[in-house]
């Protein structure tokens, strides 16, 4: 996860309480403009002040904590201060899926096909009216391709309703960026795409395959049926919009 965070941003800067991933070339992509907090003694006030200083050029403030206990301890105070709090599950594939995948339902696709499917999904999100935001997310995807040998999977492969990406590094595989267009949900496309990506990671020699997902959202139920179990969590703290000064 540290490799992914640091590898796709423009620069990594040591701060008083952690490491800042700074990417002014992609200012609308929050995840490449965040501070990873590594100081277990840091207070909410100190971290908020550091975010204001380091992320002054951006329209958001974002902090990431890989230490689950630290995140859980600080979450109530961050919420009280007006931050959005996300507990992000780390789910490891430990067992077979509840049923075998339908043959051919999901498969690897070209970068162009995967990019088009993810763009269609992203345009349906609250930020999707911003063409520039969609473009910057596609640029982020291209960086993951270079840094983590990312590959694209979709279902159905010849007319994608759902796409996802597979990252690999040092014997680990991560399935991420899962998205199904709204009009074609409920037909097992996400199940097929994720299963194809996870199977490909295992076939290519990844010793462990994992996913991350919002603890407050429903996809974790699907991933559990596909053989993924929660092994821990990280925390993310987001504040927006930030008025320009």
Image (spheres, rainbow, N blue to C red):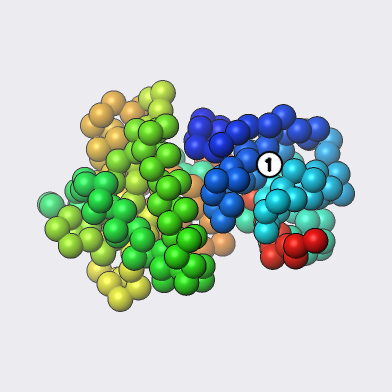
Q: In this view of the protein, which residue sits in the foreground, 148 or 170?
A: 148
Residue 139 vs residue 72, the one in the foreground: 139
Q: For the C terminus, give its image quadrant.
A: bottom right
Label 1: how many Cα within 10 Å (few below 14, some 14–19, many 20+):
many
Q: Is residue 127 left or right of residue 199?
A: right
Asked if one can make out residue 67 in the rendered structure from this viewpoint, the answer is no
- SS category of the residue bearing label 1: strand
Residue 90 % position (x, y): 51, 44
Name which quarter of the figure residue 233 lies in: top right
Q: Please identify the residue farthest to the bottom as the structure is shown.
A: 183
Q: Residue at x 63, y 56 (%)?
A: 86
* Residue under the point 36% across and 61% down: 119
Quick check: 32 left or right of 79? left
Residue 95: percent from left, percent from top: 34, 41
* Up-down relation of residue 104 to residue 166 (above or below): below
> Looking at the picture, how far across and down is residue 61, in whole percent?
70, 53
Dot 1 corresponds to which residue? 35
Q: Residue at x 29, y 58 (%)?
A: 116
Residue 227 visible in the displayed image:
yes
Q: Quadrant of residue 68?
A: top right
Task: Please count the marks in the image.
Answer: 1
Does residue 17 lie above or below 114 as drawn? above
x and y, in percent, of residue 214 in the image: 54, 56
* Residue found 68% across the figure and 41% down from its top: 35
The picture quadrant where one finds residue 182 is: bottom left
């Amino acid at each position: 996860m540290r490799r992914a965070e640091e590898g796709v941003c423009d620069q990594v800067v040591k701060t008083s309480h952690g490491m800042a991933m700074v990417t002014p070339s992609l200012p609308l992509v929050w995840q490449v403009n965040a501070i990873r907090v590594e100081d277990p003694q840091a207070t909410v006030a100190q971290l908020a002040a550091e975010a204001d200083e380091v992320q002054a050029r951006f329209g958001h403030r974002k902090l990431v904590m890989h230490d689950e206990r630290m995140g859980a301890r600080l979450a109530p105070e961050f919420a009280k201060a007006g931050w959005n709090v996300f507990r992000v599950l780390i789910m490891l594939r430990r067992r077979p899926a509840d049923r075998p995948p339908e043959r051919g339902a999901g498969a690897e696709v070209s970068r162009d096909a995967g990019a088009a499917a993810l763009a269609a999904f992203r345009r349906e999100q609250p930020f999707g009216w911003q063409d520039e935001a969609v473009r910057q997310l596609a640029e982020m995807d291209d960086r993951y391709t270079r840094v983590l040998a990312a590959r694209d999977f979709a279902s159905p492969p010849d007319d994608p309703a759902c796409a996802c990406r597979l990252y690999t590094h040092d014997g680990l595989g991560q399935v991420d960026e899962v998205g199904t267009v709204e009009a074609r949900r409920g037909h097992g496309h996400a199940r097929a795409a994720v299963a194809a990506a996870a199977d490909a990671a295992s076939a290519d020699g990844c010793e462990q395959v994992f996913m991350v997902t919002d603890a407050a959202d429903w996809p974790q139920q699907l991933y559990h049926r596909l053989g993924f179990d929660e092994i821990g969590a990280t925390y993310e703290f987001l504040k927006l919009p930030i008025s320009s000064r």
